[in-house]
Image: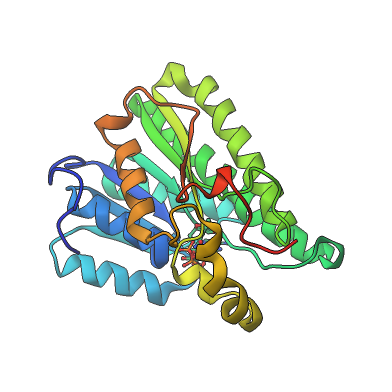
């Protein structure tokens, strides 16, 4: 964990920040940035090893990190996990719905099981965690929810399932922002472009070797994103900079949403 390159060190002092998928990649960068700003953190994902490694690294820096296995597709397990986080800290100030995943495939070849898995994770899972956390936020008088989505604004060839799920989350972000404004629960999204992160390692060899190395050419800023680029946007929305922002989606994509898609059609 290093000091924030952007924000003052006590920006999130004593806030409890919950990050799903917080043991790897973008999620871990968000956890480290929030911890560097004084937050206490909770992380959950299916593989316990990466959660333990992240929690141990934070503990070595004196940061309290609650961690426990979580499958966001299981609504009962989500409710129990969120309640356990709340019981541990006594409050939940910020939820970052970062957990997600998909696989590239032409739409014509996606099987029902694969389609359901991606929708269950990226849309339904985001909803389950949001509702469970919001129930605590409403009781405590407010909170922040930040949904990590993706750059699917002009269609998402090769990623029909996740494009549909993320578009659903963007609309959900607006609806929840309106419904929960009276409870001072602010709901926003961050849409990363292509970020050099562990997520890219999960793609098939052909995509990793032939498509990803060429992707920077399709980005107006001519580079892929860093995990910190996304973490800074999340910290901004979690802190006082985000006090008057709700229902918005903040693109962190080097201008890519305005120009082209890096995936071949
Ligand atoms: N990298 C990019 O270019 C990019 C661009 C746009 C959006 N995103 C999105 O940003 C988020 C983070 O991506 P990343 O690149 O950091 O990839 P990543 O390391 O693969 O992060 C995904 C995280 O979600 C967790 N997860 C997946 N399914 C889960 C489930 N059912 N329940 C609980 N946790 C689950 C994973 O942990 P377990 O496998 O242990 O559960 C992992 O920690 C993802 O939602 C991704 O789709 C990434």
| Image-quadrant location for residue 212 | bottom right
> Taking 15 as reference, is 262 left or right?
right
Instruction: Identify the image quadrant of the N terminus.
Output: bottom left
Q: Quadrant of residue 183?
A: top left
264 to 135, vertically: above or below: below
Q: Residue 21, percent across and down?
A: 45, 61
Image-based side of 31 in relation to 135, left or right: left
> Taking the image as drawn, is residue 71 in sight?
no
The residue located at (51%, 60%) in the rendering is: 194
Q: Nearer the viewer, residue 95 or 250?
A: 250
Instruction: Name the residue at 40% across, 59% down.
Output: 27
- The number of callouts visible is 0
Q: Is residue 237 positioned above or below 6 on the image?
A: above
Tell me where residue 222 appears, x and y as whole percent: 45, 59
Q: Nearer the viewer, residue 70 or 217?
A: 217
Front position in the image: 102 or 51: 102
30 vs 205: above or below: above
For the C terminus, give its image quadrant: bottom right
Q: Residue at x 52, y 52 (%)?
A: 78
């Amino acid at each position: 964990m290093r000091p924030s390159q952007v924000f003052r060190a006590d920006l999130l002092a004593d806030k409890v920040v919950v990050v799903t998928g917080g043991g790897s990649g973008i999620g871990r960068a968000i956890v480290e940035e929030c911890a560097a700003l004084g937050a206490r953190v909770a992380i959950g994902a299916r593989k316990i090893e990466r959660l333990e490694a992240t929690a141990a690294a934070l503990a070595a820096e004196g940061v309290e990190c609650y961690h426990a296995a979580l499958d966001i597709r299981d609504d009962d397990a989500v409710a129990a996990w969120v309640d356990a986080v709340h019981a541990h800290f006594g409050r939940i100030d910020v939820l970052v719905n970062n957990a997600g995943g998909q696989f590239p495939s032409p739409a014509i070849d996606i099987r029902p099981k694969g389609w359901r898995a991606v929708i269950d994770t990226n849309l339904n899972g985001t909803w389950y965690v949001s509702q469970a956390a919001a129930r605590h936020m409403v009781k405590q008088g407010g909170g922040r929810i930040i949904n990590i989505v993706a750059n699917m604004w002009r269609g998402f060839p090769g990623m029909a399932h996740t494009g549909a799920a993320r578009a659903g989350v963007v609309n959900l972000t607006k609806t929840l922002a309106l419904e929960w404004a009276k409870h001072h629960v602010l709901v926003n999204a961050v849409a990363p472009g292509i970020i050099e992160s562990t997520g890219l390692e999960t793609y098939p060899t052909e995509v990793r070797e032939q498509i990803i190395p060429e992707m920077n050419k399709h980005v107006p800023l001519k580079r892929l994103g860093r995990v910190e680029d996304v973490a800074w946007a999340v910290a901004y929305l979690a802190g006082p900079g985000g006090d008057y922002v709700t229902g918005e989606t903040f693109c962190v994509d080097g201008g890519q949403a305005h120009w082209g898609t890096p995936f071949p059609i």
